[in-house]
Amino acid sequence: MNDSKRRDRARRAKRTPMEGLRWWWNTRIRSLWTVRLPALINKRNSSAPTFAFKQSGTEIGDVRSEGITAILTVYKRGEYLSAQVDALKKQTIPPTEIWVWCNDSDVPLEDVSEIVDRVIVSNSNWKFWGRFAIANLVRTPYICLFDDDILPQPNWLKNCLDTYASGIDGILGGSGVLLPAEGGYSSKNKVGWNGHHFNEATRVDLVGHAWFFKKEHLKYIWQEQPMSWENGEDIHLSCMAWKHDGVGTYVPPHPADDESLWSCRPDFGKRVGRTSSATFKSAGHHNVRDEMVDTYRKAGWKIVADEITVE
């Protein structure tokens, strides 16, 4: 562009005195009454609740080369939160950070800001997906998530890291499900704290209750839209990991004679999980899961039973 064209464009861009006056009036005088004054009135009249945490989270920081971030969920059973935090801090390899995700809970939220690193409160019920969304902000290479009725035993996190060190690279969890070959969803054949207790890591179709995975594996849950947002995050994650990269799902060792490796203390999980607030007892829960499993299998998801049949 030559100099004359630049000068011509500059002249056209310059406001006339009348345009300048109008701009000054709208942004200085008019906005005082239409924007700032209503905002001030709303602020003075506001009765919205505030969250006054005793302690603020530290600066989130840069990506770390090592470490684990644990994410706990508060929904119906917040009274067990402090016990979960204590169990995580007593791990032989404790998490680098502990986060608490409050998913539109209708029970009082205990202020745990002094004993955890971050507390995130939502006024919307994101069901089972919110914690996986929050996990995208994690700065550590490993992530573990826990349902609110799970109390990990002291060597659980070490068990997961040892499983990776053994050469297994996949989605890990504490309660694995082997789906039936004939179709649909069934949790009758389980591996883990509430199922078969094997001395070695075991391939399963999906895991729940307590997940452990590399942050790079988190991408799989967002690879495609889930068939349903109602539930089935465990099905969706394992299916997408297998479908897009052939990444399997495993339950680390849960030997019968060493509960220190288990993902959950059995008396805690069975007792707390039986409460009336347990989501798996809600109407339509199994119907959605049946449909999700069948839909994904028709789309090409090969479950463990399929692979055994082929062999």
Image: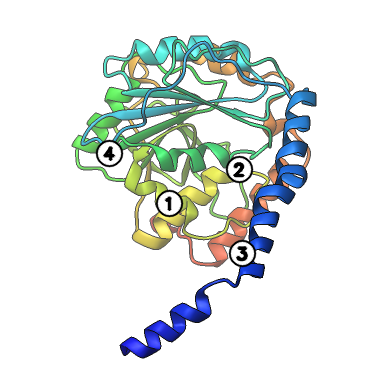
Q: Which residue is mark 3?
A: 20
Residue type, label 4 = Val
User: Which residue is nearer to you in this view: 30 or 60?
Assistant: 30
Residue type, label 2 = Ser
Q: Which residue is mark 4?
A: 63
**Cα distance between the residues tagged 1 and 3:** 72 Å
Mark before the other along the chain sequence, 3 or 4 = 3
Image marks 3 and 4: residues in contact by CB distance under 8 Å: no
Mark before the other along the chain sequence, 2 or 1 = 2
**Cα distance between the residues tagged 2 and 1:** 14 Å
Q: Quadrant of residue 59?
A: top left
Residue type, label 3 = Gly
Q: Which residue is mark 2?
A: 186
Disc 1 versus disc 3: nearer the observer:
3
Residue type, label 1 = Val
User: Which residue is nearer to you in this view: 167 or 37?
Assistant: 37
**Cα distance between the residues tagged 4 and 1:** 35 Å
Dot 2: few (<14), some (14–19), or many (≥20) neighbours within 10 Å?
A: some
